[in-house]
Amino acid sequence: MNSETFEAIKPWLNFIHPTLMWGILALTLYAAYLGWQHRRTRLASGEEKKELVKGKFLARHHQAGSTLLALMVLGSLGGMSSTYINNGKLFFGPHLLIGLGMMGLIATSASMVPFMQKGNDAARYTHISLNAVLVGLFSYQAFSGVQIVGKILNSMFGSAA
C-alpha cells in the first residue's frame, strides 16, 4: 500500500473501532442471556431441566465469552492504534481509562471459569458481579464513543459546511 492510499483511508480507521464495539456490546448482552439460561438450567429439576439442557446454554455461553474476550482486547487495541495513527497521541480521558479497565475486568472474569467448573460459588458470584459492572461500563463507553464519533465527523465534514 502506498502512502497516498494510506492517507486516503486513514480517517476511516476511526470508524472500525466503534462499529466493532457496538457489535461486541450486542454479543455481551447475548452472552449474559446465555449465562442466565445456563444458571436456570443448573438450578432446575425434572422436566424443566430436561427441556433447558437441550439449549446447550453452557457451551454457547463459553463460545460467546471466548469470542468476547478476544474481540474486546483486539478491538480496544485497534481503537488505540487508530487514534494514535490519526493523531500521533492517545487522548487521556475517561473513555480510554474505562476501556483499559474493561479489558482487565473481562480477563479477570474469564479467569474465574476453571474455579467455577470446580463448583466454587465465590468464583461464580465474582464472575457475575464483574460482568454486571462490565455491562454498565460498556453502556457508558457506547454513548461516550458516540460523542467521540460525532467530534470526528464534525472535524471531517463540519468545516466544509
Image (cartoon, rainbow, N blue to C red):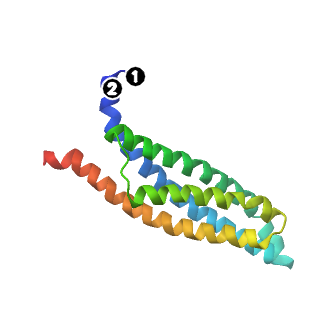
- Quadrant housing residue 106: bottom right
Q: For mark 2, what is the residue?
A: 5
- Quadrant housing residue 144: bottom left
Specify few, some or many for label 1: CA neighbours under 10 Å numbering under 14, 14-19, or 20 or more: few
Q: Amino acid at mark 1?
A: Met
Q: Which mark, by number, is residue 1?
A: 1
Q: Residue furthest top?
A: 2
Please identify the quadrant where the N terminus is shown: top left
Q: Amino acid at mark 2?
A: Thr
Q: Residue at x 18, y 50 (%)?
A: 158
Distance Cα–Cα, label 1 vs label 2? 6 Å
Q: Residue furthest left?
A: 161
Circles 1 and 2, Cβ within 8 Å, touching? The answer is yes
Left or right of residue 79, residue 135 in this image: right
Measured as percent of width and height from the top left, residue 156 is found at: 23, 45
Q: Residue at x 58, y 70 (%)?
A: 132
For residue 88, above or below residue 25: above
Q: Which mark, by number, is residue 127?
A: none
Specify few, some or many for label 2: CA neighbours under 10 Å numbering under 14, 14-19, or 20 or more: few
- Towards the viewer: 46 or 103: 103
- Towards the viewer: 86 or 46: 86
